[in-house]
Image: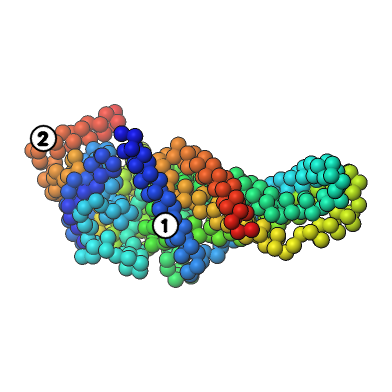
Amino acid sequence: MIITENLCKSFGDLKVLNGVSLQVEKGEILALIGGSGHGKTVILKHVAGLMKPDRGRVYINGKDIYSLRGDELEQLRSRLGFLFQSGALFSSLTVFDNVAFPLREKTRLNEQEIRERVLAALEQVGLKGAENKYPAQISGGMIKRTALARSFVRNPEIMLFDEPTTGLDPVIAHTILDLIKSIHKDLQFTGIIVSHELSRVFQIVQKVAMLHEGTILFVGTPEEIMASSNPAVRQFITEVFDSRLRNTL
Amino acid sequence: MFIRKLGALSLMTLRRTGRMGLFLAKTFFFAVTPPLKFTQLLRQIQFIGFQSVLVIFLTGAFSGMVIGLQGYYTLSRFGSAALLGPMVALSLIKELGPVLSALMVTGRAGSAMTAEIGIMRITEQIDAIELMGLNPLRYLVVPKFLAGILALPLLTAIFDVVGIFGGYLIGVKLLGIGEGTYFGEMANYVRMQDITEGVYKSISFGVLISWVCCYKGYHVGFGAEGVSKATTQAVVLSSVLILFWDYILTSALF
């Protein structure tokens, strides 16, 4: 279970988060939506403990992550998977080694077991045969899929997805979202997904939260947000669907 | 207004210096506590040390040759050309060897360290390492830091030896000083303490280069421009600090 409590964060004079409170139940995926630059990634980085808020708390499974140190923090992070917007693959390692990296560094599996786990993960994301390629030799979609394989190869309980479909064509974007759906079915992780692919994302999440001007403007099910009469919510939803339609045409 | 600006500048400088100091202290701590990423360390020794040998060889040879040439003409004026050997050796061992090796390593490997860590920072690779439960300082910075400390004295030793032979080529083979005179006087005048001074200097320069270059990469700004700025700053700051620290060590300790 993930809880953020009154998160506030400023960068210089720019106030990005102004009291963000959210709750994601165990096994649930929450879609975090909102305009670009409104702080969605900042929230994810706070949940992962990569950023510290000016005020507020983040609890994961009841533990305040900012009070965790050393082994406790390491243990928490071993149960967390993060898909970065850029993929964040290690450019000096092959696709195989990128996915094997967390297993080699943080588990006691032998090389044969690691090989089996990595090949299974790569097969699941449709990258069988690309093991020996470097990130510079593969497409954006393949980078995202490799990063996805790396993020779930340790079977995390919590997964955070930062715009997993940005910059990809609609077919690849749908493939990535379908993969997330099937991985969720297998692992039953608790997750937050930041995405603008609303129509598809709404099919895989149980809850939606809309961030607007540093605060959560709306929380509810996908059906509830689609029926919302809040003008800011309506405007955002309409704009996103219009722009997707324009892109398709 | 001026006082306020001066105060703000002083506070900012103090904050940055404190952050750099903390970075060094943490790196030291992780360098002396297990586990050590041994494969990474070997890779870095290969990169900082072995791959710098050619440039150190060339710089050392030409430095020794030019000291041989200049030294011969200067010493000849006082009828002391026989002391060319000690002059070349002492100049190289005590000053030029450690300083020029450090400057060369800064330009070749230090800039690459900053760029590598900086790119990893802006492409979120360091965040990814952290989220895997690994300590980025231990994984990325400590191997570079230790490799710098180990490689610099060895590179300096190569620089000194090659430089002494460069001076030999000019002094003995070109200008006609006796071979026995060149090496004999060198053995008479160069003490073990001179050599250890050079080693201490090169070790401290190794710390300086790795510290400044890794810090600048780790705390890089945004985008490609941030990396390019950090790389320039790392090279300039390391070079200035090497010369400053060289003066402090020479004047205060030796």
Q: Residue at x 70, y 63 (%)?
A: B193
Which element carries disc 1, helix, strand or loop? helix
Q: Residue at x 28, y 57 (%)?
A: A184
User: Where on the picture, by quarter, is residue A2?
Assistant: bottom left
Against B64, residue A232 (above or below) is above
Task: Using the image, tell me which numbered label, if any, was put on residue A231.
Answer: 2
**Residue type indicated by callout 1:** Leu
Q: B72 above or below B134?
A: above
Q: Position of residue B77 (x, y in %)?
A: 84, 41
Tell me if A224 is positioned left or right of A77 in this view: left
Q: Which residue is mark 1?
A: B22
Q: Chain of mark 1?
A: B
Query: In the image, is residue B254 above or below residue A214?
Result: below
Q: Residues within 10 Å of mark 1 (few under 14, many from 20)?
A: few
Q: Residue at x 31, y 45 (%)?
A: A163
Q: Disc 2 marks which amino acid?
A: Pro
Residue A222 appears in the rendering: no
